[in-house]
Image (cartoon, rainbow, N blue to C red):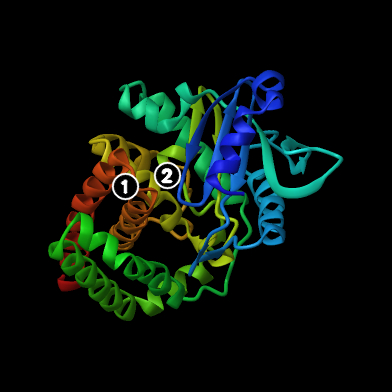
Amino acid sequence: MNSVQIKDLCLSSELQQKYNYERTIETHISWILLCEKYVFKIKKPVKYEFLDYSDVLKRALYCHKEVNLNNRFAIGIYLKVIPITYYKKQFKLNGTVGEIAEYAIMMKRLDENFLLSNLLKKNKIDELNLLHLSKYVYKIHKESEIHHNFNVNTLAFRLNQVLNLKNIIHENIGNDGLDLINKVIDTSNLFLEKHKSFLKKRAKQSHVRIVHGDLHSENIFIEGEIINFIDCIEFEENYMKIDLLDDIASILVDFDFYNKENFGIKFLQQYASFYRTSHHNPMSTVLLNYYKMQRSVTRFSVCLLTKSKVNLNDAKKYYSLLKNYETLVIKGLCS
């Protein structure tokens, strides 16, 4: 489907009357249709180096993968994959007649007041929230499947994706932006070369697992002791088979993004406290700084791809964080 067809679907009597459609959120890879009780997520027909949603059968496959994978972290939220049919010049959700034009993921709608990013914006998060969050992250990490075949080159590949955005970076940030990205890539290569054996050792110590892969503040809901993580990575398995510190780095970057560094420190302390022995404790300041640098590049890139004024401002803020993290990684390399 394209943006015009999505608008037609949103204006349909079914979505308006049966589901009480409210609004659409558009990302660089999806349209998210928010209704009173449900959410319908439709993947865009796009192709990047890191994902391929270019035809409807691939999108159907990834919809099913997304439902299955996310049920690990948001039990009962991801309901099913439904077809979108086109019949008599109308699009219909879960239709039984007409041609299948697209597929959508049907989800229960979660209360956005409990979205971590909104809690941070409104200063409505406290130490008890952090304790529930850190405890749930630890639980998920402890229960996740161990992955021993960790490929360090995956980290370099993931970071190098930003080079595909050179024109956008130059347009919005200028030459300084391109210089920083090249510097970050050089720093990353030096880090990976120096710590290659250390990274592989962590896999043997069970610190690499099949986890969420994208734990930033727009994917985390905290309602008391009830925690839900949505939108885990489904399009690239290697982005889920990661170090535990890589998984939590996204949360920490967003704490810094919202100027809540003290929450990041507290979250880390609580998370680390659940590990009984130093052998099982995955903490490493040097490695954490590296993953924060990686994750800030990801958030910077996503904001640029979404192409709105708000996201551009966010991109510039992640860009500032990236400079700070790169400096920390350099200091670690020199020590």
Extreme-right residue of the structure:
97
The residue that appears at 29% across and 59% down in the rendered structure is: 293
- Residue annotated with mark 2: 216
Relative placement, left or right, of 281 versus 34 is left
Total number of numbered labels?
2
The kind of residue on which mark 2 rests is His
Q: Residue at x 38, y 78 (%)?
A: 196
> In this rendering, is residue 202 above or below 17?
below
Quick check: marks 1 and 2 in contact, CB under 8 Å?
yes
Residue 118 vs 324, above or below: the answer is above
Above or below, 296 relative to 25 = below
Q: In 3D space, how far apart are the residues under numbered discs 1 and 2 (Cα atoms)?
A: 8 Å
Q: Looking at the picture, which amino acid does disc 1 mark?
A: Val
Decide which of tag 1 and tag 2 comes sooner along the chain: 2
Position in image of residue 55 (x %, y %) = 65, 62
> Which part of the image, by quadrant, shows the C terminus?
bottom left
Please identify the quarter of the rendering in which residue 59 is found.
Answer: bottom right
Is 145 left, or right, of 89 in this rendering? left
Q: Quadrant of residue 98?
A: top right
Residue 253 — which label? 1
Q: Secondary structure at mark 1?
A: helix
Please state the horizontal and vertical placement of residue 146, each as a whole percent of the image: 60, 62
Is any atom of residue 207 visible in this view?
no
